Amino acid sequence: MSLTFVYQGKSKRYSCELSMRNAVSFFVLVSGVLLMSSRSAYSPNEDLARVTLTQNSLEEQKEDVVALKQTTEQQLGGLTDKLAELQVKLSQLEQLGQNIVTTAGLNPQEFSFASAQSQQIKADWSQEPLVSQIDQLAYVIDDKTRQLEALESILIGRHIDEESSLSGRPISSGWLSSYYGVRKDPFTGKPTMHKGLDFAGTEGEAVHSTGAGIVTWAGDRYGYGQLVEIDHGDGLTTRYGHNKKLNVKVGDVVTKGQNIALMGNTGRSTGAHVHYEVLRFGEQQDPLPFVYHQP
């Protein structure tokens, strides 16, 4: 069996006859040559493109790493600066706490603001890891904060005691016109127990609370005229009688020295003055020791 190949040109005609075996061999040879030629033309360009792509990717990753390094260095530098700033503030806080303890006359051993642990942090400032420094500093600051809160409670308690303790006169000017004790009643002329102090002055003058407390009476009361009564706690109560006008009402919380009324001449009174009483558990006391008491 054979194959005949015919080529017809414009003026000539060619023909070739090959056996089946020779035709197959020729076809295999031609296919191999074409395949090798194709691979030799494609592979180098493809590999070169892959290498170029890989190089570009590595360059981009390198730029990302450099940028990340710069950002990290900036952040670490900022944290270091912040830690140094906090350390300075901690030192100032310790000094402030020590000054308050000394001024208040408290035991410095009970409020050790310059603790050994904070000194250790200062000593290891450049040796400890950054995160460890932050943790230690946070712990010390919490400890100082708790000490300051306790110190604040003590000072507030002292302030409350000073505010609620009775002292001073109920008026800024004027004079003491009548003492505590038995005296002649100005209306009947008979000896009568006078259970307070009278401070005479000008009508309309301010009347002040002699201690902090809560108003338990603000209004007219027989004999007292316009009366203000203040509960100061611990069984102590003060009364301010014969006022012209009241500036507080029942339930008001007043501070020491607050203007609570204006001096008047209401009730059983013969002239402008304030009748001042001090009661302990409901019993009138001589107000004079309280007037000259130094808190």
Image (cartoon, rainbow, N blue to C red):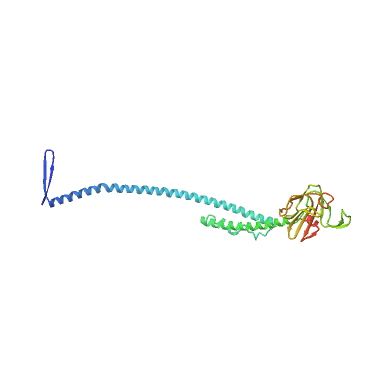
Quadrant in which the C terminus is drawn: bottom right
Residue lying farthest to the top in this orientation: 11
Residue at (40%, 49%) from the top-left corner?
62
Compare residues 30 and 222 and report the one nearer the observer.
222
* 170 to the left or right of 154: right
Task: List x then y, in percent, for residue 180.
Answer: 83, 57
Compare residues 206 and 47 and report the one nearer the observer.
206
Task: List x then y, in percent, for residue 114.
Answer: 62, 57
Residue at (70%, 56%) from the top-left corner?
160
Residue at (58%, 59%) from the top-left corner?
117
* 60 to the left or right of 146: left
Task: List x then y, in percent, for residue 159.
Answer: 70, 55
* 164 to the left or right of 97: right
Task: List x then y, in percent, for residue 263.
Answer: 79, 49
Compare residues 26 and 99 and report the one nearer the observer.
26
Count of marks overlaid on the render: 0
Residue 292 visible, this angle = no
Residue 75 visible, this angle = yes
Residue at (19%, 49%) from the top-left corner?
31
